[in-house]
Amino acid sequence: MTDTGFDVAGLKASHRPVSEFRYEKRPVVAGYNDRTLYVNVGDGRIAEKPVSADTRAKFTGGKGYGLKLLWDAVTPATKWNDPENEVNIATGPVGGNTNYPGSGKSIVVSISPTTGIPIDCNVGGYFGPFLKFSGFDALELQGRAERDVIVYIDGDEGVVKIFEAPGEAVDSHVLAEQMVAMFARDENDRQHISSVSAGSGAENSLIGCLNFSFYDKRRKVARLKQAGRGGIGTVFRDKKIKAVVVKYSSLDVTSNNPADLAKLQETGLKLHREIIELDDQQCRMREIGTAHLTEIMNEYDLLPTCNYKFGSSPDAEGINSHAFSAIVTHGLPDGCWYGCTMACAKAADGFELATGPYKGHKVTVDGPEYETVAGCGANIGVFDPRVVLELNFYCDTYGIDTISFGTSTAFIMECWENGILDSDRTGGLEITWGNGPAALELLHRIGRGEGFGLVAGLGVRRMKAYFAEHYGADPKFLQDIGCECKGLEYSQYVSKESLAQQGGYSMALKGPQHDEAWLIFMDMVNNRIPTFEDKAEALYYFPMFRTWFGLQGLCKLPWNDIEPADNASTDEPAKVPEHVDNYLAIYKAVTGNDLDREGLIRQSARVYNFQKVFCIRMGKGRRIDDLPPYRMVGPVTVEEYESRADRYDKQLREQVGVDPSGMDTPAKIAALRAYREDRYEKLQDAVYKRKGWTREGIPTIETLQDLGIDYPEVVEVVKPLL
Amino acid sequence: MITVNGSPHPWHDGMTVRKILEEKRYTFPLLVVRIDGRLVPRSDYGETTVPDGADVDVMHLMSGG
Ligand code: SF4
C-alpha cells in the first residue's frame, strides 16, 4: 500500500493494454475543436472524427452534438443494451470558460434502459471542459467489452488508451480516488484528473447514474456530481466500462481561446459581484445550495410527501435547509467548476456511515441537493437528515439515481400500504412509510443485485407490470399511483395544482424531469398564465430557453437562482432579461458570432425538434406517451382528497360547476378527475400547436423545414405519421 | 377586500405588503410586488401600506433544480 491508501503499483500491474491512439494536439479556437473522439470498447477502435460545418451550424454543441452522434450510431431497433448504443459526453462552445459562473457542465446522452428513447443529463465536475481542452468537443463511447476496462485520455500527451482493469473498485467514491492516485504525479497534479464512473448498483439495476469527479484540493478528496436520470450508468456498466478518465494540466483563462476575452471577463465580473452582494438575501445558494428549496416547497404544498400524495408535512422541519446547514461544511469555495461563485456544490465532511459495506467509514457526502432531500426524505416519509445523507452517499457511490430511487421506494411503500407487498414478497423488509433503515437496506440490496432489490431496481414502470402479473394487483390503481411517464420516474415536485407543470413534466421529451420547465409558481401562485394558450406559450419558451444551457455546457442555476437588484422593474422579470443578455454577450465573446434572443431560441428549437423526432424514431414521442399518471394531476384516493377537501370542494363548485354537498368522496374524486383530465388534453392540443406539431404530437414537415433540420432521414421518420 | 394574484383577500386597516406576504404565507425569497401596477421595492415591504380595493400582484420568480 502507498500513502494514498491504494496499492497503485499493484493495480497498474494487473492492467492489460487493449489499444492506444495518438492524436495531434491543437488549441481550441473560439470554443470549438471541430473534432470529436470515438472510442469502441468492444473492438478497441479509437479514432477522431471531424465535425462538419453543417453539424456545427445546426447542432451547436453539447447535447446537440451528443444527440447527432447517437442518431448516427443507432437504428430504430437498437435497445439500450445493444453494443451500438452509445454513451456520449460533450460540453458546448461556451463550456469550460472560467470567467462566467456556471460554465463547466457536461451533457451526457444515451438510449435509456428505462424509457428506450434518448435521455440527456446535464452534470458538473471537470470532465467535459478537460475533454474539450484535451482536443475534443464530444466523446462517443460505443461497443461492449468482454472484461472491465478503463479509458484514459491524456490531454497533456495527446494519447488515448483502453486497458483492461480487473483490480480497481466499482463503487465511485473509491474508484474516483484510485483514478486520482493512479494518474496524478503528485498532490498538486490531482486537480488535473477527472473521471466518469458508475457503481455496483448501476450494474444491478436499470436506474444507474454516472458520477463525474472533480478534485477538491482543500478537502483533499475527489468529489462527485451526478448525471442522474434515465439509467445512463446502467448502460456504462453494461459496456463493462469501469471509468473514463481525462487528464489536462494547462487550464487557464485562455484555454477556451475566446474571441473576446475582455468582454467575457467583464460580463463574468458583473455576475460575480451580483452573486456576492445578493445571494445571502435571495436563495442562499452559497450557504446550502438547492436544499434551500425544501422549506419553501413545504410551505407552498409542493414538497412530495408519501409518494406525492401530499405536498407538505409538519415533520418537514427535520430535513429543512437549516438541518442540513448544521451538517455541511461551510466557508469553502464549493464550485463544481472553476469560476463559479454560486458555489452551491455543498458537502458534508467526516460523515460516519451507519450501514452497508462501508459502515464505520468517515466519508465526504456530496450534497444533498433539494431533489435528494425530497425524494429520499419526505416522499418516503423519512425526516431524519442523517438517513437522507446516508441514502445520498450510497446512491452516489453505487451509481444509482437518487430521484428514481426515491420515487421507486415511495411507490413500493404505497404498494405495501395497500397490501400489494408484504415481508414475504420483499424478503423480510418492512418497507413502510418513514422506515429509514428498511430504505437503506433496500438500497444495499439493489447495490448487491439481491432479492427484492432486483425488482426495485427495475424502476416504477416495470414494477407496475411485475406487481400486476405476479401479485394480482390492480393495474389501473398501479398506473394511477406509480409516478413515472415514458418509463422515467418523476422528479420531486407536486404538480397537482398546476396544469402547466403537469404538461411541463409529462410533455418533457425525455420524461418527467423539471429541467425543461418549472412553471408552478407562474401558474398556480402568480396566476399569470390562465389560458391554455398562455400555458402553451410558457411551455414553448421555457423548454426552448433552457435547452440552450445544454447546447453550451452551462448550468441553469446562475440564470434565475440569483437575480439582478433591478430585475423587478424589467418587463419580464421571470425571464431575468439581464441574464439572458449576459448569455448573448458571452456567446459572442467566446465564438465571435452574433446572437440575438430569437437566434438563441432557434438554436434550441433545432435540437429540441431533432430530439423529438429521435424519440418517435425509437417508438415513442406520441401523444399517448405524454399522458401523466393521475397522481400527478389530482387526488387518487379518498385519504388524499379528504386531506385537502376544502380546496377540492371549492374547485368542484367554482370550476367544475358541480355542487359537492351530498356527494360521497369517490363521486367527488371522479367528477374532479373527469374535469382535470379533459383540461390536460386541451393543454396538449395547445402545446403541440404552439410547437408546430400535429395533434398527435408529430413535428410537421414545415416545422422541420423552417428549422433547417429537414434531413431525408428525419423527414422519413415523421412522414408516415402525418 | 383586496385582490392578491387574482383572488380576493380580506383587507384591514394599516395593512402592509409584509403583512400580506405573511398572511398568504409567501415565503419565497424572489418576489416582485406591485400594487395597482406600481412596483414596491423589497426594502419597503414593511412600510408600504395597501389601500382597500387594491389589486396586489405578488410575482414569484421561478426557481427549482
Ligand atoms: S451553480 Fe452550483 S451546480 Fe451550477 S455550476 Fe455553480 S456550483 Fe455547479
Image: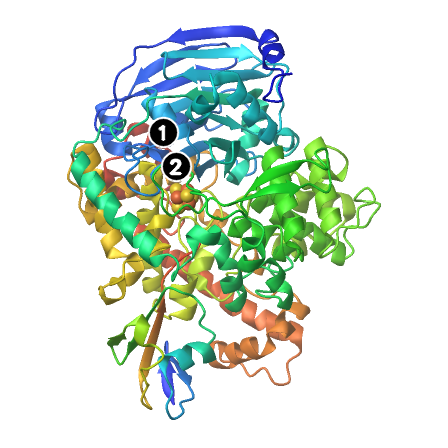
Q: Amino acid at mark 1?
A: Pro
Residue B44 versus residue A704 in the image, above or below: below
Ligand 1's quadrant: top left
Q: Are marks 2 and 1 in contact (CB under 8 Å)?
A: yes
Q: Left or right of A231: which side holds A161?
A: left
Ligand 1 has an atom within 8 Å of the beta carbon of the residue at disc 1: no
Q: Chain of mark 2?
A: A
Question: In this view of the protein, can residue A29 be seen by the observer?
Answer: yes
**For the residue labelled by badge 1, is the local secondary structure a helix, a strand or a loop?**
helix
In the rendering, at what x and y percent does residue A220 appear?
A: 52, 31
Q: Nearer the viewer, mark 2 or mark 1?
A: 2
Residue A386 versus residue A299 in the image, above or below: above
Q: Quadrant of the C terminus of chain A?
A: top left
* Quarter of the image where one finds residue A255: top left
Marks counted in the figure total 2
Ligand 1 has an atom within 8 Å of the beta carbon of the residue at disc 2: yes
Residue drawn at x 68%, y 69% is A639
Q: Which residue is mark 1?
A: A129
Q: Chain of mark 1?
A: A
**For the residue labelled by badge 2, is the local secondary structure a helix, a strand or a loop?**
loop
Instruction: Choose between A261 and A56: the one closer to the eye.
Output: A261
Residue drawn at x 56%, y 43% is A487
Q: Which residue is mark 2?
A: A337
Q: Left or right of A317: which side holds A423?
A: right
Residue B50 versus residue A344 in the image, above or below: below
